[in-house]
Image: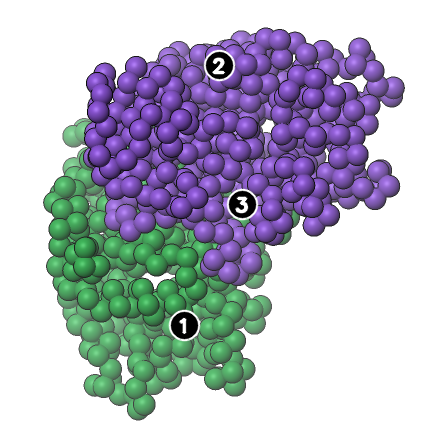
Chain colours: A purple, B green
Amino acid sequence: MAILFENVTAVLMDGGHTVLPHAFVAVEGHTITSVGTGRPSGEFERVIDGKGGILMPGLVNCHTHVPMTAMRGYGDGHHLQDWLNNFIFPVEAKWDDRAIRACADLGLMEMIASGTTCIADMYMRVGVIGQAVADAGISANLCCGGTFFGEAFSPAACSDCTAQEELVKAWHGYDGGRIRVDASLHAEYTSQPGLWEWTADFAKRNHLGMHVHISETMREHEECKERRGGLTPIQVMDKYGVWDVCSIAAHCVWTTPQDWAIMAEKGVTAVHNPASNLKLGSGVAPIPAMKKAGINVALGTDGVSSNNTTDMFEDMKLSAILQNGVLRDPMALSAWDVVEMATVNGARALGRDTGAVAVGREADLILLDSEAVNLIPCHDAANNIAYAAHGANVKLNMCRGKVIYENGTFLTIDAEKVKAEVREYALPLLFGK
Amino acid sequence: MAILFENVTAVLMDGGHTVLPHAFVAVEGHTITSVGTGRPSGEFERVIDGKGGILMPGLVNCHTHVPMTAMRGYGDGHHLQDWLNNFIFPVEAKWDDRAIRACADLGLMEMIASGTTCIADMYMRVGVIGQAVADAGISANLCCGGTFFGEAFSPAACSDCTAQEELVKAWHGYDGGRIRVDASLHAEYTSQPGLWEWTADFAKRNHLGMHVHISETMREHEECKERRGGLTPIQVMDKYGVWDVCSIAAHCVWTTPQDWAIMAEKGVTAVHNPASNLKLGSGVAPIPAMKKAGINVALGTDGVSSNNTTDMFEDMKLSAILQNGVLRDPMALSAWDVVEMATVNGARALGRDTGAVAVGREADLILLDSEAVNLIPCHDAANNIAYAAHGANVKLNMCRGKVIYENGTFLTIDAEKVKAEVREYALPLLFGK
C-alpha cells in the first residue's frame, strides 16, 4: 500500500539535523520511498494531512520487559532486594502463557500509543511474547535473559540454553526480520563462564545480537570485581567473547573508562535507562563521558515495574535534563543528542534500518499532534520533541508502512479485550485479586 | 450548582493516606460537601460517573511565569547568562498587553488540561494576567517580582512599588479570594535592602503572602554571601522582615541547614522546581533534608521557557525519582511525599483551603481516566499518580465547583481563538515571525 504524508514538519534524524517544514514523505510497502518538500509523483491509496505536525522516526526502546506491565508500581517504596524477593519474584513464579500474553499486549499498547515502533525485550515465556509482537505489528529483538545457578555448567543442564535454541527456531527472522531473536545473558551475577562461552558461541553460530544487563548497581559491579579477580562485568564477559557480535549492554551506570574502551572497540551499545536507574536508587550513568569515549548510546525505559511507564518521551527529557543538572552544565546533553539516542542510535544498536526518515529505511514513523497545547509554539522541532512532548501527543503510529494506531484507536490490538483479559484473568492469577 | 461524583477512587490527601474506592464526592457551590462510600442524600444537577478513575485534589503549581509559554524552548542549549541576555530579555522587552494576554491564556490552557487548579505566578504586566485567570476560572496568587537597580531606593523611584500597590487594588481578593496578590521580590541579586524593607512592610500592611526566587544557582548564592557579609539570600532577607508573612521561596537549590532553620521557624515554604533546576544546570535541591528540617516543601514547574512544559505530573515523578537516584536510596521520597508536595503542601504554602478531598474545602478536583492504558493496573492509587500518570490522563478539571475542562474541551477559554492570537499576533510581535 502506498501512503503519502503531506504538510508535515519532517525531523529526519540525519547527521545534518535536518528539519523539513511543509514536507512530503511517501511510503510504499514497508519502506520510505520519498522525502522532500515537493509533492512526489505517483498514486497513493491514502494521503495523510499532518497539519504541520512533526513527523519523525518511530522510537526505538532498547531495553524493556514488556509483560512486567502487570507489576506497575507493585511493591514500590521498598529496597531493591526486598522488592525483588518479596514482591517481584513471587509474582513472576505464577505466570502462565495466557497471563503473559494479556500483559504483553497491554504493555505493547502503552508503547504503541506513545510512539514506539521497535523494542529490545528481555523476559521469560518469550515465545508467547513473540506472538504478541507478531500480531501487534511492531518490530522487536526478543531474548530470554539466560541464567545458570548450578555447579557444573553444560548446555543440557541449562534450561535457558534449550529455550534460546527453540526461540531462534520459532521467531528469528519472522516477517522479513521484523522479529529477531538476540542471544542473551541476564547478568554476570546470575550466570557463569560456562554459560558466557556457550552464549557467545550460540550468538555467532546463529548470527544473533546480544543483550545483557551490565553494572546497573554499584553492588553488582563491585561484587563482580571481587569474584572475578578485579574484572568488571564488561571486562570479564569480553574475555569469553560475549561482545564479539552486535551487542547491547543495559544500564552501564557503574561502568568505568576501561570498560568504555572495550565497548567502543567492540561496538557495544550502552542502553541508558534513566527513569529506572533513578527510581531504584541505582545512580546516574555517565552518558556524556560514554559518548565522548565513542560509545553508541541508546535509550530504554526498562520494565514498567521500575519506571513506571514506557513513554520514551519521558526518558528522552529525563536523559537530557538529568545530565545537565548533575553535571551543572545546561549543555551537557542537547535535545538532538537525546532524540538521536531514542531513534538512530537505537536502530544502530539493534542492527536495523529504522530510526531515520530517509529513502530506503523502514517506514517506522510517528506523527505528533500540531494542535496539542504543550507543543505550541514550536521554535525548534527537536527541542519540542525532547522537552515538551509526551506520548499522548502521538496521533499516529506507523510500523513498517502499516498504520497500527491512530487518534487513540489501536488497529492491530483489540484494546477492550486485552484490558478485560488483564483484569479478569491475569491480575487475579498473579495477585489473587 | 450541586454536582455528585460517583464511582471514583478518591485519593483524599489526608494525613492517613486514605484512598476510598467506589466513593461518592458531592460539591455544592464552590465547596466539597460530602465525601464517602455511601451515596449522599440530596438532589444533584449533575452526576458524573468516574468509572473507577482516580478523583484527587487539583494540583497546586507554586512557581510559574505563565506568559513565558511563548518562549517554549527558545534559546535552549545556551549557558544561563547567554540565554537570558541574548534570548529571553530581548523578547521580554517586546511584550504588549495583547500578547501577554494571548500567551497567558495559552499557558493556562496547558495547566488546566494537565490538572492544575491553582498557581502562584510571578511575571510582568500582571494586571492582564489577572484578567486571564479571572476568565479561566482557576485560582491564583499573582505577583510582579519586584526589582530595583538604582542607587538610592525610594518607593517613588521604584516603578515596581507602584505596580504592586495597583495590583493589590485591582485584583487582591477577587471572586471571594480566588485571585490573591502576593508581595514579591524577584531575587536578592535584582534588589536591595530598601526594597526588601518596603516589600516586607507592604505585605504586612495589606495582609499579603510573599514570593521570592531564592538560591537557584550556586553563583547567585555565593555572590550574595560576598555582598552581604556572609549572609545567604534567606538570611539577609530575614533580617529585613521579608519572611514575617506567609512566604514561598522558589528553588532553594543551594540553601543551607542554617537557612532551613529560619525557614522552618518562619514557616517559609520551599518550592521545588526539579525540571527547571536540572535543565538549566542549577543542581538538585536537597528536598529530603529540607523536609526533615521541618520545612513545608511544595512543587512548581517554573516557566515553560526552562522546563519546557507545565505538566505537574512530570515534576511529581521527577521529584521522587531524582532524590532516589542522587541519594541512591529508593525510599528517599515516596509517592505520597510528592503527591503531597503538589497538593496539600501547595495549599498550605499559599494559605488556601484547597489541596485535599475533604468536606469544607474548595471543590478543586481532577478526575483521571481509568481506561488510560498507562494507568492499568492500579495496585496503589498514589503510586500511579506519582509515577505512571501524565497530564493527558486528566479527563475533567473542576475549579471551585465549576467544571472548566472536560474530555479535551476547554469550557472557559476559546481554545481556537487563543491559538490564533498566539500564532497571528503574539509570536510575530515577539519573534518577528
Give how far across and how far down residue B221 sits, in percent: 49, 73
Left or right of residue A205: residue B273: left
Can the viewer see residue B244 in this picture?
no
State the separation of the CA atoms marked 3 and 1.
Answer: 31 Å
Query: In the displayed image of the protein, which residue is found farthest to the bottom?
Result: B152
Chain ID of residue with mark 2? A
The label on residue A176 is: 2
Q: CA distance from mark 2 to mark 1?
A: 68 Å
The reply to whether label 3 and label 2 mark residues of one chain is: no
The residue located at (71%, 42%) in the rendering is A262
Q: How busy is the neighbourhood of tag 2: few (under 14 within 10 Å), some, or many (20 plus)? A: few
Q: Chain of mark 3?
A: B
Query: Residue at label 1?
Result: B243
Q: Tell me if residue A283 comes above or below residue A133 in the rendering.
A: below
Q: Residue at x 67, y 37 (%)?
A: A266
Q: Are marks 3 and 1 on the same chain?
A: yes
A146, B276: nearer the viewer: A146
Q: Dot 3 corresponds to which residue? A: B321
